[in-house]
Amino acid sequence: MFKIVKSDEPLIVETVNILIYGEPGSGKTSLVNTAESPLTLDFDKGVHRSDFRKDVLVIESWKQINDNIGELIKTFGSYNTVILDTIDTLLDYMGAWIIDQEPKLARNKLQFYGKLKDEFSLFVGKLKTLGKDVVMIAHVREKEEGDLRIKRPAITGGSYDRVLQTADFVGYLFIKDNKRTIDFNPTDYWIGKNSAKFSAMNIPDFNNNPDFFAGLVEDMKSAINGQTQSQAETIKLIKELSSKVQGMSNLTDINTFLPELASMKNGVKKQIWDKIQLRAKELNFEFNKDEKKFYQVQTETPTVVEKAKTIKSTSKKESIEIEEPDFNFG
């Protein structure tokens, strides 16, 4: 069965994809292990260095995952969060497996990266269909852009854009003044993605706040769902107001409605004002800016002389002579 979500109904987000990147030793793995019921797929074999690690599945190769995907899906069943540590090593494993399957792709980078993107999207998509939050960890890399050195996730070549497209949030974790800080906002100095409009935040002591990242994930979902709920309500309001405007048939209807525009949000106000002007034009009304109200357009009936002059003027352009009528009836 398919369920169509109408344009004025909210799309409820139940899972999120998050990318966290930062310098070695900044605490990326410890941070994300404070998520709700996490399982880490350890591609880097470095989770043992985390002080707050939870359950771990050490991955030796992508073939191991591909050949045992059914068993792996069953394993995910009792966990709410799947952590991919690190995404760059995962892509290295995945790339090696792809070349093993199709050796000719080693000589065609374009096709290779296309296959890599597809395989990655398929895997992450499968995790989402299982109802899991996905947290991707990456190292950091600097890229020169003019006079600036931009910090960005260290992700294999052509897969960079696909990973960032997949992520709902991208946060840079760093240490400043001996404090761990995470910032999801894009700046001149690092890449970010922040649908929830979070401010940069200090990372607490996990002994006192062992569920820090779990709370952050809930805030992310609430922010996104709040936006979709608001969007749905706005769309519904615009539909209702548009219908009301279209039903207007006289000056009183339109002019009485105008004061309501003042209380509308700018986005709604602009769309409804455009519809009012269109409806007024259909009814032959025009807006007086000074009085801020509509009036009936006054059309003057041309006199017989004016009609005759118009005919003569037009006819001369067409090189046809028509005599001006004689209006002396006496």
Image (cartoon, grey):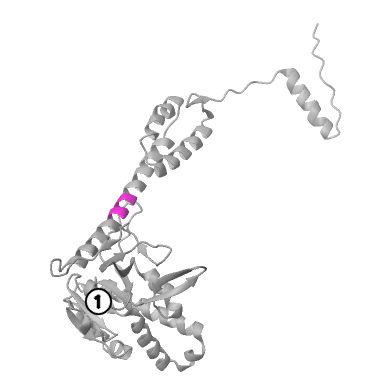
In the displayed structure, 328 sits above or below 51; it is above
Q: Nearer the viewer, residue 280 or 49?
A: 49
Report helix, strand or loop for mark 1: helix
Q: Main secondary structure of the magenta part?
A: helix
Q: Which residue is mark 1?
A: 29
Q: Nearer the viewer, residue 93 or 272?
A: 93
In the picture, the quarter occupied by the N terminus is bottom left
The answer to which image quadrant residue 5 occupies is bottom left
Residue lying at 50% horizontally and 37% vertically, measured from the top left: 278
Residue lying at 20% horizontally and 72% vertically, measured from the top left: 80
Residue 228: x %, y % from top left: 31, 54
Residue 262: x %, y % from top left: 38, 34
Residue lying at 79% horizontally and 13% vertically, measured from the top left: 327
The local crowd at label 1, few if under 14, some if 14 to 19, many if 20 or more residues have their Cα within 10 Å, is many
Q: Amino acid at mark 1?
A: Thr
From the viewer's perspective, tell me whether residue 289 is left or right of residue 253. right
Residue lying at 39% horizontally and 36% vertically, measured from the top left: 244
The answer to which image quadrant residue 306 occupies is top right
Magenta extent: 226-231
Find the residue positioned furthest to the top: 330
In the displayed structure, 56 sits above or below 203; it is below
In the displayed structure, 117 sits above or below 218; it is below
Residue 302: x %, y % from top left: 68, 21
In the picture, the quarter occupied by the C terminus is top right
